[in-house]
Image (cartoon, grey):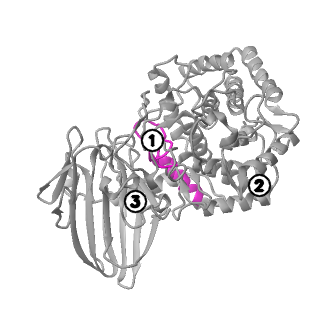
Amino acid sequence: MSDVKRKIEDHGVIGDLRTCALIANDGTLDYLCWPNLDSPSVFSALLDSDDAGLFSLAPDWAHPRQQQLYLPDTNILQTRWLGPEGVAEMTDYMPICRQHDSLPRLIRRVKMLRGEARFTFHCSPRHDYARAQTTASAGPGYIDFSAPGQPTLRLAATVNMTLDQHAATGSFHLKAGEDVVFIFGSSDDPHVTALNTLHCLDETLHYWQHWSRQSTYRGRWQENVQRSALVLKLLTSWQHGSIAAAATFGLPEELGGVRNWDYRAAWIRDASFSMYALMRLGYVDEAQHFTQWVSRCVEHSHTDEMRLQVMYRLDSSTELHEMELLNLSGYGNSRPVRIGNDAWQQTQLDIYGELMDAIYLANKYGEAISQRGWQHVSRMIDWVSENWMQADAGIWEMRGEPEHFLHSRLMCWVALDRALRLGLKRSLPMPYARWDSARSAIRQDIWENFWHKEQGHFVSTRGGKHLDASMLLMPLVRFVSATDPDWLATLDAIKIHLVSDGLVKRYNINETPADGLQGAEGSFAACSFWYVECLARAGRIHEAHFEFEKLLSYANPLGLFAEEFDVRGHALGNFPQALSHLAMISAAFFLNRKLSGEETQWQP
C-alpha cells in the first residue's frame, strides 16, 4: 500500500443520518457525497489524487504524532496532533438534520491545547464525482463553490481565506486556548454564513449520547459493540428508515483489482441483518422505521410486488443503473470506479429469508404486524413457496450464470419457517399446510442435493463439491444444530479450505465458475465473525475467544471495519461496512453469553 496516500483504515467517519464524510488521521477530509449519501461526491480525493477534491487542515509541524478518537458514545470525531511544539486538536461533526428541507452542515473546530502552531488549510470541492468544472467566488467571510447543474456550496470561517485557483486556502496562528471554526454547507443555508455553531456541539453530543444510552448490552467488549451500533445508526436514513450497506463507493476488494462496487444503497439482506443487530441491543424504533421503508419498496417496485429487488435506493426508489467514472483513477489505481449497481436487477432468493427473519423479530420485540402488513407477507411467502427451487445469483451477487445455491435454499426455508411461526404466534390467517409442505420440501432438498456423501460435508451448490462461507449461517438461523456431527464436519472443512489464521474467504474463486470476474479479493470480515460465532455455538469457546480477539485487532484505531481484510489484515473494500459491524455485534453477543455461563436457549 506504499502508493496510497491515505489508507482506508486511516479514516474516521462522521455524519448526520443523511450523509457521511471520511476524515483521515492527518486531518484531511477526502470523501463526502452531498447532500445525501447517494448523491454525487463533492470530495473524492480518496478515489483519485488530491485534485479530485479535499479539505485539508493541519499544523505546520514536521513529524507530529497523529491520533483520532470519538467523543465517548458519539459520532463526533477528534483528530489530534502531538509534538514538541505543543498539542492541537480538531473536532469534526455534522449537526443532525431535523427537517426534511434542512441541508447538511459540516463543522470543523481547531483548538490549540498547549504550545502554539501555524495551521495551513486547503478546501477544493469538486462537484459531481469531480466531473464538473467547479468554480469559486469570494464573499464577505465566505467562499462559494459552484458548477453547472450542481448545488452551490459555501465555506465560511472565523479566519481570513484566500481564493487560489478555485480553492479556499490560507493559514493562521494559534496559541494555547485559541480556536478557529470552519463551516461547510449550502450557500442557501444561513447558518453557514452566520458561523452559527452556538449549541451545535452540545446538541449533537446530546443526540448521540442519548441514543447510545438506550443500548441494553452490558457484556464484554461493550465499547466495540457500541461503536459498531453507532456505525449502523450512522448509515441509517432518519428520513426514510433505510440502512446503507456502506458509506462509500468504489473502494477495492483487491488493491489494483476490478471488484470495486457502489455500496451507497440499501440491500434488503444487509438492512434486515442490521435491524436484527440493533434490536438485540435494545434499539426497537429503528425496526419500525425499517419495516415502513420495506413497505414503500414493495409499492415502488417495477416488477411483481412479491418479487423484491435485491437492493433499493435509500429513498426506496428502484433503479440503480451502474456506470464507470472514467475520470477517477481509483484508490491505489484500482479501476474501474463504479457508481450504481446492476445487481439491483438480479434474482437473489435469500433476501426473503433475511427480511422475514427481521419482520419476525420486529414483531417479537416491537409492535405487532398490521393487517395490511400481514397481507403483504402472505403474498410474498406464497411466491416463495412456489419459486424456491429456482436458480439465482446467490448472496454474493455472482455475475456469471445463475446456479442453485445452498444459501438461497436455506434462506427460503427461513422465510417459510418464520412466517409460520409468526402466524401461529399472532393467530393470523395463513395456508398453514401449503407453507409447511414447502418448508419440509426445502429441508429435504438441502439434505439430498447439498450434502456430499463422499466428502462428508455440505456443499455450496446443488450437486457440487466446494464450500462457501455463507454456509456458516446454517446454525445461526437454526436450520441445523450447531453441534450436529454433520454440521461440525462442514465447519471443519470450511476451516481447512477457507480460513487462514481466523480470516475467512467467501469462497475460492477458482472453484466458483459463477463468480465471473477477474482477479482476487480479500478475506470477508462478516464471514470471519460468523466463523467465530459458529465456533462458540459448537462449544469451542477458547478457540472462538482467541479468534475474536484477533479480529478485533484488525479494526482501525477507532474500532471501524471495512468490508474485507488483505493478507496483512489491512482494510479493503467499502468503509465502514454495515455487514462487518453487525456480524461483530452478533459474535460478541453470543460469545459473551457463553463465556459468562449464561443459558443460550434455542430461539428462532
- The answer to whether marks 3 and 1 mark residues whose Cβ atoms lie closer than 8 Å is no
Does any portion of residue 578 appear in the rendered image?
Answer: yes
User: Residue 107: horizontal and vertical position, in percent?
Assistant: 31, 58
Q: CA distance from mark 1 to mark 2?
A: 35 Å
Q: CA distance from mark 3 to mark 1?
A: 18 Å
Corner quadrant of residue 458: top right
Point out the frontmost of discs 1 and 2: 1
Does any portion of residue 429 appear in the rendered image?
Answer: no
Which sits in the foreground, 460 or 528? Answer: 460
Q: Does residue 402 sit above or below 545 in this rendering?
A: above
Residue under circle 1?
Answer: 264
Left/right placement of residue 386 relative to residue 458 reads: left
Q: Does residue 373 sit above or below 540 in this rendering?
A: above
Q: Is residue 600 magenta?
A: no
Helix, strand or loop at mark 1: loop
Q: CA distance from mark 3 to mark 2?
A: 37 Å
Magenta residues span: 224-252
| Type of the residue with mark 1 | Arg
Left/right placement of residue 14 relative to residue 105 reads: right
The single residue placed furthest to the left in the displayed view is 140
Residue under circle 3?
Answer: 23
| Type of the residue with mark 2 | Lys
Magenta: main secondary structure: loop
Corner quadrant of residue 541: bottom right
Q: Does residue 563 sit above or below 140 in this rendering?
A: above
Helix, strand or loop at mark 3: strand
Which sits in the foreground, 394 or 335? Answer: 335
Left/right placement of residue 357 relative to residue 44 reads: right
Label 2 neighbour load within 10 Å: few <14, some 14-19, many 20+: some
